[in-house]
Image: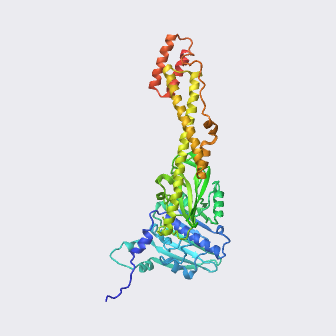
């Protein structure tokens, strides 16, 4: 019989859980924020705060000194528990069904990007400040030394140092400091603020006019959207949702569309269990929302913290580009939808399978929505095209004149063709109206917005009043003989063939001025 050996956990597990945990370095901010948010919640339940608005999370980024700190004024940690909580790995006592962070590994994420990771904390009623320092450089050196096979606990003990100091009795806080930051992205204040505006559990900006409508829906569902006061270098962070949609870049933006409403959906099982709910923007869906719009895409959230990136829900759409036609969020409710260790998606289980099936069905409606919008816009464009061309035809017929009979016939044929297309477009819009009446309200809203005040135009496509006599461009050159007018007409015909339309018209007008 073989004797049972003692289990050992090697140092490489520390690398997996700290130095190699995340693909995007900015995720460390999310990890520290979610831990602070949990402690603010605890401060409320313990009676330290009346509500979460009393709590604050302050981030300071000093690029010149290569230092980052994340501070919260929540409960702090009792001195006797500091080492057990901050040195032990993956031994969190938090409830995964309630807390935002619950594995006890996220707080060490900063080790990958700095020389020293320092935790400072004080608990209300204790006149002591606890300081635990992790030596990241030493940790990396130990892990990279393949000649020695240390155990994980030995490594942790050798790279950490604990000390205490005096503190005021009424102080309560927790502070994380990253010294000697080696990652440039983490020191980019503007970039981090933008990142947190979509990832962190922060309020909607005051200028986002649909925030009250979203809050009302949450209240209707008895769902609390956790919103914390988070600051980056003293500037409060808000969600980046706006009602304007732009193209271009941050230095040169041009408005191309507008959010004119939002709509909601509930993700419920066949037994009416609410797994999640969400909202999405309603615009003209003229094109995929360009990347210059920070909030583009449908975002997945748990505890109001973004799960993964803006691509997390892409796989549930018929087309990968589909989510980029909207702003929006899905707030997950079910405690069985549990974020994985990297917090880029959920753990595989039966609840997730059901959730994905129901979300796919909802996304099919959104898929139909932007195609419906595209079809309606195309039909309106055909009517607008006919109306515009008919005015041009009338102007040429009664004022500016045609170059010759051939041009007049071509205009007449083109006018008739555009008229036929406009008539068919009008019928298509009538069909769309009937379809929208039996479809989700979002299609009706899109139809009203895209068609708008064009109803009168669509109901009766205008016709051209045929002139008694066709006017030619040379009619106003009275001093020319008929023979000369024919010659000028031929010259104008050549100009029309070789020059772009606008330039050709300009040249012809200049010639007319010279001959009059």
Location of residue 8 by image quarter: bottom left
Relative image position of residue 320 (x, y in whole percent): 46, 54
The residue located at (57%, 39%) in the rendering is 427
Quadrant housing the N terminus: bottom left
Which of the two residues, 237 or 446, is positioned nearer the viewer here?
Answer: 446
**Residue 479, horizontal then vertical, whole percent:** 56, 11
Q: Position of residue 16 (x, y in %)?
A: 42, 71
Q: Is residue 258 visible?
A: no
- Extreme residue toward the left, this view: 1
- Identify the residue at the far right of this view: 50
Q: Position of residue 315 (x, y in %)?
A: 46, 58
Decide if residue 1 is on the left or right side of residue 374. Answer: left
Judge whether 512 appears above or below 102 on screen.
above
Given residues 10 and 165, the one toward you in this image is 10
Query: Residue at the location (57% across, 67% down)?
Result: 271
Q: Quadrant of the C terminus?
A: top right
Q: Report whether residue 201 is seen.
A: yes
As displayed, is residue 339 above or below residue 414?
Answer: below
The colour style of the image is: rainbow
In screen coordinates, is 42 left or right of 149? right
Please give the name of the residue rendered at 62% of the width and 39% of the height, measured from the top-left corner: 454
Q: Is residue 164 above or below residue 507?
A: below
Q: Which image quadrant for residue 327? A: bottom right
């Amino acid at each position: 019989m073989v004797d049972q050996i003692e289990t050992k956990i090697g140092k490489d597990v520390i690398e997996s859980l700290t130095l190699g945990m995340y693909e995007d370095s900015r995720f460390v901010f999310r990890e520290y924020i979610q831990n602070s948010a949990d402690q603010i919640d605890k401060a409320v339940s313990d009676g330290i705060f009346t509500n979460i608005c009393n709590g604050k999370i302050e981030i300071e980024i000093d690029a010149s000194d290569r230092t980052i700190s994340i501070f919260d004024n929540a409960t702090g940690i009792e001195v006797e528990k500091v080492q057990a909580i901050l040195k032990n790995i993956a031994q969190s006592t938090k409830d995964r069904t309630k807390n935002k962070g619950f594995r006890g590994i996220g707080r060490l994420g900063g080790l990958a990007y700095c020389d020293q990771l320092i935790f400072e904390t004080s608990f209300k009623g204790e006149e002591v400040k606890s300081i635990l320092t992790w030596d990241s450089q030493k940790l990396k050196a130990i892990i990279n030394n393949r000649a020695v096979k240390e155990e994980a606990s030995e490594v942790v003990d050798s790279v950490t140092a604990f000390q205490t100091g005096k503190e005021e009795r009424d102080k309560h806080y927790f502070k994380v400091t990253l010294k000697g930051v080696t990652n440039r992205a983490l020191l980019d204040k503007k970039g981090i603020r933008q990142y947190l505006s979509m990832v962190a559990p922060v309020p909607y900006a005051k200028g986002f006019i649909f925030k009250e409508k979203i809050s009302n829906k949450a209240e209707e569902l008895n769902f609390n959207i956790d919103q914390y006061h988070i600051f980056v270098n003293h500037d409060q962070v808000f969600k980046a949702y706006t009602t304007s949609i732009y193209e271009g870049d941050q230095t040169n933006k041009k408005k191309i569309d507008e959010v004119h409403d939002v709509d909601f959906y509930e993700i419920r099982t066949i037994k009416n269990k609410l797994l999640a709910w969400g909202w999405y923007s309603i615009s003209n869906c003229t094109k995929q929302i360009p990347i210059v719009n920070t909030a583009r895409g449908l975002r997945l959230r748990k505890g109001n913290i973004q799960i993964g990136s803006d691509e997390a829900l892409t796989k549930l759409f018929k087309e990968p580009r589909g989510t980029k036609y909207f702003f929006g969020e899905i707030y997950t409710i079910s405690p069985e939808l549990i974020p994985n260790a990297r917090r880029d998606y959920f753990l595989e289980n039966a609840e997730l399978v059901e959730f994905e099936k129901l979300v796919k069905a909802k996304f099919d409606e959104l898929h139909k929505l932007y195609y419906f919008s595209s079809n309606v816009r195309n039909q309106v464009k055909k009517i607008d095209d006919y109306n515009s061309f008919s005015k041009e035809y009338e102007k040429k017929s009664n004022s500016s004149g045609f170059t010759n009979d051939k041009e007049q016939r071509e205009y007449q044929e083109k006018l008739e063709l555009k008229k036929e297309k406009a008539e068919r477009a009008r019928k298509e819009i009538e069909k769309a109206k009937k379809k929208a009446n039996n479809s989700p309200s979002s299609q009706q809203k899109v139809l009203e917005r895209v068609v708008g005040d064009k109803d009168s135009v669509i109901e009766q496509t205008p016709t051209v009043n045929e002139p008694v006599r066709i006017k030619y461009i040379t009619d106003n050159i009275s001093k020319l003989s008929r023979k000369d007018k024919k010659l000028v007409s031929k010259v104008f015909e050549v100009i029309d063939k070789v020059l772009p339309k606008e330039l050709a018209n300009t040249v012809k007008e200049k010639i007319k001025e010279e001959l009059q």
